[in-house]
């Protein structure tokens, strides 16, 4: 029997899949789109760079989570020692942690540049108002990522910085709302092990799920509207 050419096997597999669901059409629609000439200006790439940075944060975050221990009980706390272990012992741990740290900083700068571009070209106006609102929500989520991530190393700086941010959130008016947010975030009378557990959960489960969902909506909107014409 003649051995089939790899290309024929590939075609047969694609055909088999396409008979069950139009995958080829879906991939074509997702990947191929004419981009207008005016979008060649360098500042139109900021949104794409934000996307690449978020993917990098997700990948390096998953690698960090392989060794990080979200436990603040005892002295020294496993959270603190696990970060030291990543930094000094794990193969390329210093690089993964450094990339996650600097990626987070660069991300904030790029999101602000992207927002400035959208504002500068007046792209927040009709019919793109909803996408602007989705954008602002993602910006707030990114700030929440920074805030929750800052506590995770569980060192003195992280502890006291978080104490201040929780106090600030706790003083939000009306009093009941402020107190409620403080209690939810802190999980006890003072910043302690339950706070770390909560910040970790928000940082690695809640926020990534929300941002991936909102990015999907953001991109669907962009596809629906097309890139806005320069003013
Ligand atoms: C997770 C963060 C974000 C990602 C991954 C992202 C990604 C993108 C991409 C790839 C584009 C296509 C054009 C371009 O790159 O300039 C775009 C357009 C747009 N973005 Fe974002 N963006 C994010 C955050 C934001 C924020 C914070 C705002 C505003 C508050 C915003 C508002 C918009 C609007 C209104 C458009 C349409 C612009 C036009 O049609 O010219 N985005 N975004």
Image (spheres, helix red, strand yellow):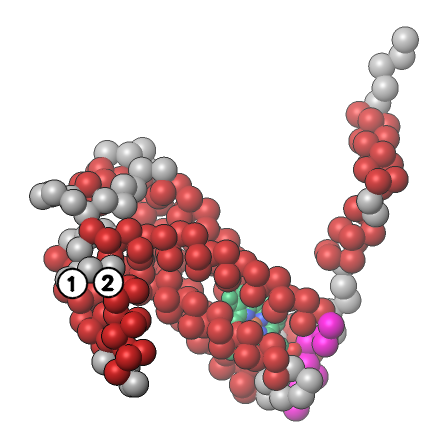
Range shown magenta: 224-231
Q: Quadrant of the C terminus?
A: bottom right
Q: Which residue is mark 2?
A: 186
Q: Which residue is mark 1?
A: 189
The quadrant where residue 121 appears: bottom right
At 82% from the left and 44% from the top, the residue drawn is 21
Q: Secondary structure at mark 2?
A: helix
Q: Quadrant of the N terminus?
A: top right
Q: Is residue 159 above or below residue 25?
A: below
Q: Which residue is at the far right?
A: 1
Q: Is residue 225 magenta?
A: yes
Separation of marks 1 and 2 at Cα, in angstroms: 7 Å
Q: Which residue is at the far left?
A: 75
Q: Do the residues bearing badges 1 and 2 touch, measured as CB atoms within 8 Å?
A: yes
- Where residue 8 appears, x then y in whole percent? 86, 28
Q: Is residue 72 magenta?
A: no
Ligand 1 located in image quadrant = bottom right
The quadrant where residue 151 appears: bottom left
State whether residue 156 appears in this view.
Answer: yes
């Amino acid at each position: 029997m003649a051995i089939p050419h790899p290309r024929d096997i590939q075609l047969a597999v694609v055909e088999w899949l396409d008979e069950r669901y139009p995958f080829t059409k879906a991939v074509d629609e997702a990947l191929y789109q004419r981009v207008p000439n005016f979008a060649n200006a360098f500042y139109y790439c900021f949104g794409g760079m934000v996307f690449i940075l978020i993917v990098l944060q997700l990948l390096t975050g998953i690698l960090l989570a392989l060794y990080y221990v979200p436990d603040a009980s005892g002295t020294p706390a496993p959270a603190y020692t696990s970060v030291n272990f990543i930094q000094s012992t794990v193969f390329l741990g210093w690089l993964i942690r450094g990339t996650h740290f600097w990626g987070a900083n660069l991300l904030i700068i790029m999101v602000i540049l992207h927002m400035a571009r959208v504002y500068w070209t007046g792209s927040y106006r009709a019919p793109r108002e909803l996408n602007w609102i989705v954008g602002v929500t993602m910006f707030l989520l990114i700030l929440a990522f920074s805030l929750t991530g800052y506590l995770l190393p569980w060192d003195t700086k992280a502890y006291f910085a978080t104490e201040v941010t929780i106090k600030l959130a706790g003083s939000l008016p009306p009093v009941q709302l402020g107190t409620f947010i403080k209690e939810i975030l802190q999980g006890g009378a003072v910043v302690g092990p339950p706070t770390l557990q909560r910040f970790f959960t928000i940082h690695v489960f809640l926020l990534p799920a929300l941002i991936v969902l909102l990015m999907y909506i953001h991109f669907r909107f962009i596809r629906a509207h097309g890139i806005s014409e320069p003013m």
